[in-house]
Amino acid sequence: MDKIELFRKFEQLKVIPVVKIDDANDALPLAEAFVQGGLPCAEITFRTAAAADAIKKMASRSDMLVGAGTVLSVDTVKQAIDCGAKFIVAPGFNPKVVEYCVANGIPVTPGVATPTEIEMGLDMGIDVLKFFPAEAMGGLKTLTAISAPYGKVRFVPTGGVDEKNLAAYLAFAKTLCCGGTWIAKADLINAKAFDQIADITKRAVEIAKMAGAKK
């Protein structure tokens, strides 16, 4: 899947669940919860030792679009791709990670919070960037301001986005989709509360649909 096709899919989905998973054995039931909820996708963050195995298990489902998050090094990029990840997400702008992904045709969404970082992305040919941590950096007000000079850039706000503000972020013309860190929190995964996660996923999809209809 090339980046154009991938980002088109992101735009259709509108929300990408962002997951911190402690036990790789939870990956498949979690994937089922996302599919049942209407979001057959996930960003598995490299914040735990289980991340690589979880990506491998979840990516074994042909109906799941799986990527890797919290990618801080080129070695982690390689590991994630070997496990079946289709896209790479980083919390910040690491030039080595971005350069490697661009050179190897791997879709990458590095994190930005300033105009300088946006221009670093543009300089490397990247026009889809993660706005992170969205709410802590001032939310939609800040994103509106820093994105104003960059007409072709689209953003993936992540961090503090939830059911209360999702619609507002999605209504912003330069939002491609949002990172859903609230959809499958670690405590719910560890409690095997997959039915609850499916319900939260369904609500996110409903909010996204309503926001899309108003856009």
Image (tube, rainbow, N blue to C red):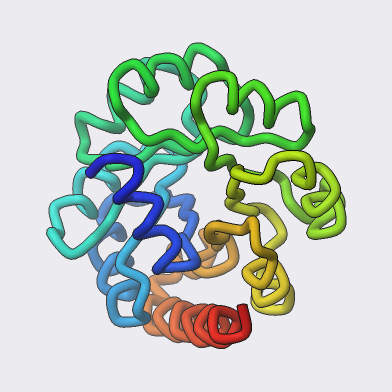
Lateral position of residue 95 relative to residue 113, left or right: left
Percent x, y of residue 171: 66, 72
- Looking at the image, is 102 positioned above or below residue 110? above
Please indicate whether residue 193 sits to the left or right of residue 117 in the image.
left
Which of 174 and 55 lies nearest the eye of the viewer? 174
Residue 122 placement, left or right of 22: right
Image coordinates of residue 30 in percent, x first then y, are: 32, 66
Q: Residue at x 80, y 54 (%)?
A: 144
- Residue pictured at 30% horizontal, 60% vertical: 26
Q: Is residue 67 above or below residue 125?
A: below
Q: Nearer the viewer, residue 55 or 192?
A: 55
Q: Residue furthest top?
A: 96
> In which quadrant is the C terminus drawn?
bottom right
Residue 6, position as x, y percentages in the image: 33, 50
Is residue 162 shown left or right of residue 147?
left
Q: Is residue 96 above or below residue 56?
A: above
